[in-house]
Image (tube, grey):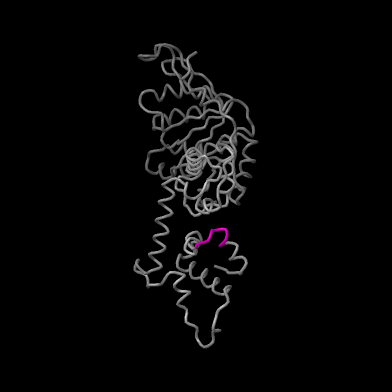
Amino acid sequence: MEKGPDMLSQIQGAPQMLVGDSIRSKQLKRLIDKLGTSRWPVLVLGETGTGKEVVARTIHHMNPDGPFVTIDCSALVGTIMESELFGHVKGAFTGAVGQKTGLIEAANGGTAFFDEIGELPLDLQAKLLRVLQEKEFRPVGSLFAKRSDFRVIAATNRDLSKEVERGTFRRDLYYRLNVVNLKLPSLRDRKEDIPMLVDHFLGVYGSGHRLAQEALDALLSYEWPGNVRELENCIQNMVAMHTGPLLTRNELPSSIQNHLFARKAQALSVAVGSSGMPAVRPVAAKVEAHVPCPADPPVLPLVELEKRAIRQALEYTRGDRGIAASLLGIGRTTLYRKLKEYELAC
């Protein structure tokens, strides 16, 4: 029996880890624990790179009956779409020299993960709905129906409710898939997990590599538009390009270096009033130019000078602690420690 070239890689795959100890990550893990004991359809929502397939695999491997089959809906293009999903019989079309098992049949008894379900054309949406309702399908060119019973997990970075209103996604299929809804947080909304994720990726890709604190501080100040996938790529890049063992801020990928430089330049321009805001001086100059009023002592203690510098830096950067730390010439963790030590509620 013929199978597509990527069939085995789509069916196989070891369970992956959900890494993170933030409040959002813990909430997600609790929901997954509940879903792992059932077979309800699940719709996983989230930005690109947030780990939707990792979540799907985790749900499946908590109750791993049958295979886990990934169906990349964005890759189903042209005339082969229906054949990839439902298979075909010999002679169904030109080039069909043998019988082929489709992904729907391969998922029988297990889990079918429909990645980027919002990309599925309307005609295939109708056929998928029938499979979910009747548990049967018909291979291309066949006169006879086959049965396939599987758990469905779908994922998308689109707002499917809006797609329904626009008429690009079937309302009945949407309700069939959206029985349980999981919304994955972006990495910028759970930055507390970054150190743990870095350790995890260094364990996977590194060879005794470790990250300098200054590099970790830089990663914590970045917004990660590509989410966990971008962080993984960042660690892969650093490990591949540098023998280590210590990976410093200077060895971060150029995209992150450029972003950090742009943010620092913007903060400095705000500090000198070049962005249209009232002109202010850099922190160090402001401290040096302090003129004591009669109520001030002739010389301020260093601790008080440091407190004022920290307050001013945070005021200039509108509370951005990463940039404030850069302006002060200290690491982000050092700034956190001093905020706690001086009991500064900034």
Picture quarter containing residue 61? top right
Q: Residue at x 57, y 45 (%)?
A: 210
Picture quarter containing residue 179? top right
Residue 306 spot, x, y in % from top left: 55, 71
Q: Residue at x 59, y 65 (%)?
A: 338
The relative height of residue 208 versus residue 104 in the rendered view (above or below) is: below
Picture quarter containing residue 119? top left
Q: Residue at x 37, y 72 (%)?
A: 279
| Residue at the extreme bottom of the image, as rendered | 294
The relative height of residue 203 versus residue 27 in the rendered view (above or below) is: above
Numbered disc total: 0
Q: Nearer the viewer, residue 71 or 8?
A: 8
Which residues, given as a range, are shown in magenta? 329-335
Q: Nearer the viewer, residue 44 or 150?
A: 44
Q: Nearer the viewer, residue 143 or 85?
A: 85
Q: In the shown orientation, is residue 81 left or right of residue 105?
A: left
Q: Residue at x 49, y 64 (%)?
A: 328
The relative height of residue 249 versus residue 160 in the rendered view (above or below) is: below
Q: In the shown orientation, is residue 80 left or right of residue 192?
A: left
The relative height of residue 64 versus residue 185 in the rendered view (above or below) is: above
**Which quadrant of the figure contains the C terminus?**
bottom right
Q: In the shown orientation, is residue 20 left or right of residue 95?
A: right
Q: Nearer the viewer, residue 210 or 136?
A: 210
Residue 78 spot, x, y in % from top left: 35, 26
Residue 226 spot, x, y in % from top left: 45, 45
Tell me if residue 51 is in the magenta stretch.
no
Residue 136 spot, x, y in % from top left: 51, 23
